[in-house]
Image (cartoon, rainbow, N blue to C red):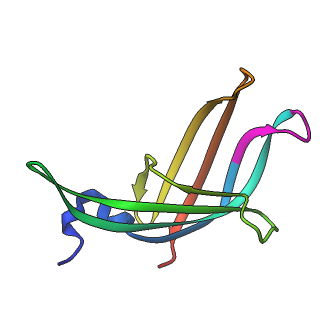
Amino acid sequence: MGNELWGPLAGLIGEWEGDAGIDVSFHNAKSAVGETKYRERVTMAPFGPVENGKQCLYGLDYRMSAWRLGEDSAFHTEIGYCKVTVKGGTFEYDSMATYVHGKGGEIGHSDRNTLKRIG
């Protein structure tokens, strides 16, 4: 069985890496919004079929780690979903989230990167 059952997601199966990431978020040490340049690695692994009533679902497990440029320890890891645009051998994404903290403040957060297949 090939990857045809994953349809347009099939092109994303594998390992991806990029070093042109820009994270825009609140920096506590500076009490201001700032940019952090980073590199990341994403692994997308196929799963399925998953039987759900009359549905037969196929999808991708997503795992990501990010490191500030010049650092060896990851500052962020994630498992989740993202919206992507596939262009040849790369995929690009933009994600934006607003977090509401217990103290009532809202924090905006934005990430952008272009990743190339490495495996």
Q: Is residue 41 left or right of residue 82?
A: right
- List x then y, in percent, for residue 44: 42, 66
Question: Closer to the camera, 48 or 89?
Answer: 48
State the image quarter where residue 11 is shown.
bottom left
Q: Which residues are magenta?
A: 23-31
Q: Is residue 62 left or right of 102 when viewed as pictured?
A: left
Residue 42 or residue 61, whichever sits in front: 61
Image coordinates of residue 95 in percent, x first then y, are: 55, 42
**Residue plotted at (38% across, 64% down):** 12
| Count of picture labels | 0
Image coordinates of residue 10 in percent, x first then y, are: 30, 65
- Quadrant (top left, top right, bottom left, bottom right) of the N terminus: bottom left
Can you name the residue that lies furthest to the left here? 54
x and y percent of residue 104 in the render? 71, 20
Residue at coordinates 47% horizontally, 79% vertically from top-left?
Answer: 119
Check residue 27 for magenta coloring.
yes
Q: Is residue 51 magenta?
A: no
Locate residue 84 relative to residue 49 in the image: left or right. Answer: right
Residue 75 higher or lower than 109, as above or below: below
| Residue 94 in which image quadrant | top right
User: In the image, is residue 83 above or below residue 42?
Assistant: above
Farthest front residue? 102
18 lies left or right of 101: left
Residue furthest right in the image: 30
